Image (spheres, rainbow, N blue to C red):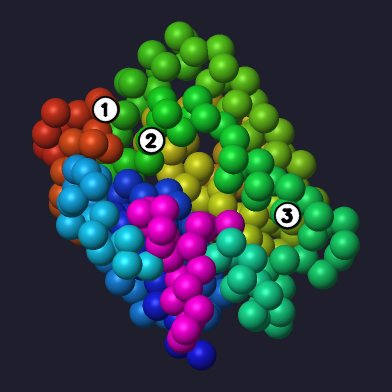
Amino acid sequence: MSYQLFIGNKNYSTWSMRPWILLKQAGIAFQEHWIQFDSFEPDSQFKTEILKLNPTGKVPALVDEDIIVWDSLAIAEYIAEQHPDKNLLPQDKKLRARARCISAEMHSGFQNLRNLCPMNVEADLSHIGKQLWAEHEQLRNEVARIDQIWSERPSEDQFLCGEFSIADAFYAPVVMRFECFDLPISASGKSYIDKILSLPSVQQWIAEAKQEQMFVPFDEPYRQTRDEYLKK
């Protein structure tokens, strides 16, 4: 079994981060194919490349021999199904249901967080975060819900559903957003952030995102150049 995972820029692509972290953290071998973000116009190089695999024209896409799986949630479910020994979905029925629910909630919800606080691994946009926090009640409500999800894990030293699961892979990019914009969080939520940031897979993603040293205007609502607001 040899997986091919097609992803976008690690500095920006939350959808790409989810299956990449899942595979890396589970120790499942795969070959990474990086497609550079651009203008995303219909005739752009990015769209030309990804449309060969995914009819929606988006990353990520997973190729398993003659099977192509697209959409990060579908990929996560497929990987969990193919590797039951990795327990990427909890064995406990109740925890398994919760893992699916909170993963789907992240996959389809939190639109204000997505729109106002796009992932930018290399940037420190804490000053923007303070302004957004003061001005957007719906953002504050979504952050409160995320904080609740993170704080409801079985115990402080565990992941969202006990052991590492697809749910944690889905909330890893959310952690990146909280770090970039320095959004307020409870002590329990902060301990979860620290737990995710300590994962070798997440540390590798962050390091490689910073190595890209690319600036994609489409994904930069708060910076005019790459040199602005870089993390020290």
Residue appearing at x 65%, y 33% in the figure: 147
Tell me if label 3 and label 2 are in contact, CB under 8 Å. Answer: no
The one nearer the camera, 109 or 210, is: 109
* Label 1: few (<14), some (14–19) or many (≥20) C-alpha neighbours in 10 Å: few
Q: Residue at x 30, y 34 (%)?
A: 124
Tell me, yes or no, whether the highlighted magenta stretch contains residue 55: yes
Q: x, y percentage for residue 160?
A: 70, 52
The correct choice, above or below, for 122 with respect to 116 in the image is below
Three-letter code, disc 1: Pro
**Residue depicted at x 26% and y 27%:** 221
Disc assigned to residue 118: 2
Q: Tag 3, which secondary structure?
A: helix
Q: Is 196 contained in the magenta span?
A: no
Q: Which mark is residue 99?
A: 3
Q: Are marks 1 and 2 in contact (CB under 8 Å)?
A: yes
Q: In the image, what residue type sits under mark 2?
A: Pro
Which residue is at the far bottom?
A: 1
User: What secondary structure is marked by label 2?
Assistant: loop
What's the CA distance linking mark 3 and mark 1? 32 Å
The structure residue drawn at horizontal position 58% and vertical position 45%, both measured from the top left corner, is 107
Dot 3 crowding, Cα within 10 Å, few <14, some 14–19, many 20+: many
Determine which residue is flagged by label 1: 221
